[in-house]
Image (tube, grey):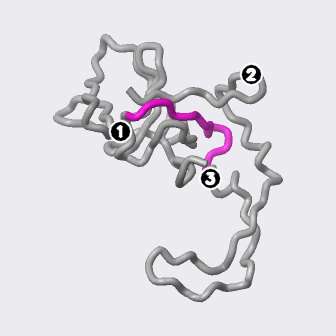
Amino acid sequence: MCTAKVIPISSHVLENFDFEVLDNIELPLYASYVSAGFPSPADDYLEDRIDLSKYLIQNPTSTYMMRVKGTSMQDANIHDGDLLVIDKALKPADGLPVVCFLDGEFTVKTFRRIEGKAYLYPANPAYKPIEITEEMDMRVWGVVVWILHRPVKL
């Protein structure tokens, strides 16, 4: 099972990440795109600076981050150690990755509705889908809007 844990800062565990700490972090944003096909000439012109919190967050009061633990979503490009940006204001819809609190544990899965039933689908054939039943204690904590990970382990 691919679970998520709340990001610890110092010795505290936060349920809601305070994105205001990112307000003054601006990084250079170049006007040209980087080619993922044939190389193109590099531009030496800086377009602007980008505030990551404004770029990553649509609803600041309902957005938080969690770290992934596990491999059940690896085929959806969600890997062990990744940071998820999750928006509680968005409604879960068929095919979207969601973070749920299921029977006392956080989990990230793809939400699916099939023939009137709700399921949480993994993205790894080693794991089975979870049918959501009335007997379960399940709450959707939000929709995953960004997945942050390094391209390689450094």
Q: Are marks 3 and 1 in contact (CB under 8 Å)?
A: no
Please say whether residue 7 is visible from this viewpoint. yes
State the separation of the CA atoms marked 3 and 2: 23 Å
The residue to which callout 3 is attached is: 56
Nearer the observer: mark 3 or 2; the answer is: 2
Residue of label 1: 110
- Circle nearer the N terminus (3, 1): 3
Mark identifier at residue 12:
2
Start-end of magenta stretch: 58-71
- Identify the residue shown where x is 30% and y is 38%: 124
Q: Which kind of residue does numbered mark 2 sit on? A: His
Spot occupied by residue 67 in the image (x, y as percentages of width and height)? 57, 34
Please state the horizontal and vertical placement of residue 78, each as a whole percent of the image: 45, 43
Image position, residue 141 (x, y; %)? 50, 30
The residue depicted at 59 percent of the width and 88 percent of the height is: 41
In the rendered image, residue 29 lying in the magenta stretch gets the answer no
Q: CA distance from mark 3 to mark 1?
A: 20 Å
Would you place residue 56 above or below residue 38 in this image?
Answer: above
Q: Is residue 95 left or right of residue 57?
A: left
Residue farthest to the left?
A: 115
Please identify, in this view, whether the residue under mark 2 or under mark 1 is nearer the observer. Answer: 2
**Can residue 118 be seen?**
no
Element at label 1: strand
What's the residue type where badge 1 is placed? Thr
At mark 3, the secondary structure is: helix
Looking at the image, is mark 2 or mark 1 earlier in the sequence? 2
Q: Residue at x 28, y 18 (%)?
A: 133
- Left or right, 63 with respect to 80, comes to right
